[in-house]
Each structure stands twice: as C-alpha cells, then as structure tokens.
Amino acid sequence: PPPTPAEAPAPAPAPADDPDETQMEDDDDLRRALEASRASVEEDAQRRRRSWSTDDRTPLTVAEYYSCFQAAQDNTGHTLEDIEEGSGVRAGNGPGSVRADGQGRAQYGRILTGATEKVANELGITDKDTALDIGSGVGNVPLQIAATFGCKARGLELMESRAVVGTALDVELAAVINERHALRRCGDCRLEWGNMRDEQWWDFLTKAEEGGHMKVFVNNFNDVMGHRSTETRDGPTLDDRICAIFAAMQPGARMLTLNRMLALGPSRDQANAVREQRGLEPSADASFFSERKVTLTPQPWPWAPEGEDVVSWGGSAIEAYVYERLGGQSLPGGAAAFLCSARGCQMGNHSATAVLDDESHELVTECVYCGEERRPAPRER
C-alpha cells in the first residue's frame, strides 16, 4: 500500500544553482517551513492516490506495474529469482520441514505477472472488491492486483521468511510508485504472516470490505495444499480449510485455484442433475457454488515479447478452477447450504443443511436429517 507520510518523508530537493536559494536552505526556520510544505504536498498526493471517488484517474497498467516491480527489486539489491533460490524462501519445501497443525511442508512457487493478470480477470475483480491470496509467498499477487485494479488486497503467508521478503518488496514498490505515478489510483495491500487455521485470521480471510466481494487466489498446484502437505493421510488438509473459508464468504465471492477443490462437493448444476435423475425438482438449495475450468497459458507480453511462462517452476499451460459463491438459498443470512441426495430422505431432499459449522468453522459433510454423507464432487471426465 502507499506508505503514510510518516513512513515516507518527502524526498530531498534537487541541488540549487542559485547560491541565495542554498543560503535560504540553511535558515532553520525557513528550512522547517519548506519541509512542512513538502510534507503537505506529499500528503495531498497520497490522499489523492488513496481516493475511492469515481473520476478519470486509473490504476497502473500491468506494464507500468511490471516496470515498478523490477525497480523495487533493484532497490533491494537482489533479484526476486536470487531471493527465491535462498534458503529463507525455500525453507518449508521439504517433507517434515514445517510443523503447523498437522501441516508437514509449505511448498513455494510463484505465479508470474501476465498470468496474475489473467487470474484477476477470471475472478472479475473491480476496485470495490477485496482480493486475497491464501499462501501468498512473497506477496507478488496481492501487490500486483492492488496496483493494477485499484482494490484492497490481502495476503496471508505461513512462512515468516517469505512474509519478510513480501514486506520489503511492499515498501520498495510503494516508494517507486509514489515517485513515478503519484497521482494514479492504486489500492491498499496488506500482507500478513500467519496460519490460515488460526481463528484470529478468520475475518481477514472471509470478510470483504464494504461494497465489494472477496476474490481469492490459491496456488495449490499439484496437491501442495492437499495430502502432500499433511502429516497424516486421513487428517484434514489445507484445501479442506480453504473450502470452509470459501463457504463462509457471502454470495458473489469467487475463488480461483490451481487444484480442484473436491471437498466443496458437487456444484449446483451437478447436484441438480442428480436431483432430476431421481425425479426431484431442481433447487437453489442443492448447492452453494458454481464451477468452471480455465487454462492459463504462456504468452507474449510487452515486457516479455518472446513469451512469459505462467509460473516460476515451468513453462507449460496450467489448468485452473474458478468457483463462484451463489446466492438464492433459504438459510438465514445467505448461509451456504446443500440438500441431501439420499433416496428416501424426505426432509433432507427438500430442507437445507448448513455447509459450515458456525462454532468449529469446519465443513459439514453429513445431512442433518438422516446422517448420510454428502454426495462427493464428480470426477473430471
């Protein structure tokens, strides 16, 4: 986010050719007045940048952001690729390298600039929304989305060393944007170090800023937040927790993941197809979300005319899954719900079961009326 004036004092004035002007700078009272004036100007510029009014000012283009992000890396004295090769960022990649509520590893990998733009567009992000990256690594996704969509953005990262890098990049990036694009309308980005299973982060992960929706990215490629990262084969996975987080969001939320979220169960269309096969009327209570598959492909960009990969670990196209939290259900407060698909469960076929346990914040997988396990999501053909 743009730093406050206290965090980023106004830059020193350019050297003056006029000796009288230099002498004026040596006058303590006048120097303090000039500094106060510069601080006021800087504060006004930042206030304009942080304005949410409807006007003709726009966020950065992706190419402008890319240039600023490269300059921010230069200011740290290290490229991001060099930082990623260090032990600090790579810590957590190996089995057993993490001990956090049954989690055994925290695999690192970064989605690149062009693919991040594609992700944001698939999520339909607007400047009223709240973007979230669960397992945000060094913070590149929320930093980019805040700067290029003018929205609020958040990131939560388990590994402290990665979160520290993200904070450093945030500070340097804000300084570069202030210098090059002070009057552009960029959003605020909040990067945090913490465990998604810790209840203190529940609201941070589930509640959007007023007037918008949660728009979520999860890099869980190749089951890295599933059983690959879980110490016990039958224990709850990080993907299970993310599914519960998504279920707690209000209708209109969207989530893009790099691994299919089977714990969500069947989508509304899939659940209603089963109902129709069994002679039951389609219902909005059948399920609480929609699902579609998209493909992220390497392609040329202004900063990479020969083409840019999708992710840091390879050059192939990657399939992703977009989930949208649907409304129109019957439970109070728009709570996520499902209908039982068991034959003979007259109550459960027509009366909704809440998807989320309000106290434990865990997914409910059984019909509240007959105890039958919820029908799983169908496998991809």
Image (cartoon, rainbow, N blue to C red):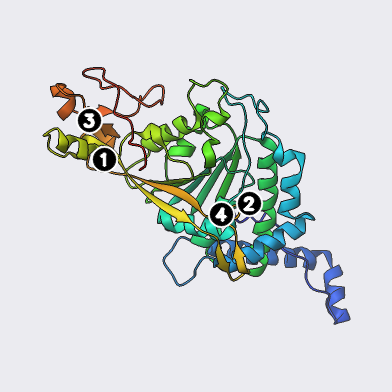
Q: Earlier in the sequence, mark 3 or mark 1?
A: 1
* Residue hosting label 1: 270
* 324 shown above or below 15: above
- Marks 1 and 3: in contact by CB < 8 Å? no
Question: Of all residues shown, which one is farthest toward the bottom?
Answer: 18
| Residue at (59, 33) in percent of width and height | 194
Left or right position of 132 against 71: left
Q: Label 4 sits on what residue type?
A: Ser
* Residue hosting label 2: 312
Q: Earlier in the sequence, mark 1 or mark 2?
A: 1
* Residue hosting label 3: 339
- Marks 4 and 2: in contact by CB < 8 Å? no
| Residue at (71, 39) in percent of width and height | 90
- Marks 2 and 1: in contact by CB < 8 Å? no
Q: Nearer the viewer, residue 271 or 137?
A: 271
Mark whose residue sits in front, 4 or 1: 4
Q: Label 3 sits on what residue type?
A: Leu
Q: Earlier in the sequence, mark 4 or mark 1?
A: 1
**Residue 206, position as x, y percentages in the image:** 43, 38
| Residue at (36, 37) in percent of width and height | 379
- Marks 1 and 4: in contact by CB < 8 Å? no
| Mark 3 and mark 1: Cα distance apart in space | 12 Å
Q: Secondary structure at mark 3?
A: loop
* Residue hosting label 4: 316
Residue 125, can we see it?
Answer: no
**Residue 106, position as x, y percentages in the image:** 62, 34
| Mark 2 and mark 4: Cα distance apart in space | 11 Å
10 Å neighbourhood of mark 3: few (<14), some, or many (≥20)?
many
Q: Secondary structure at mark 4?
A: loop
**Residue 31, position as x, y percentages in the image:** 79, 66
| Mark 1 and mark 2: Cα distance apart in space | 34 Å
Left or right position of 201 against 158: left
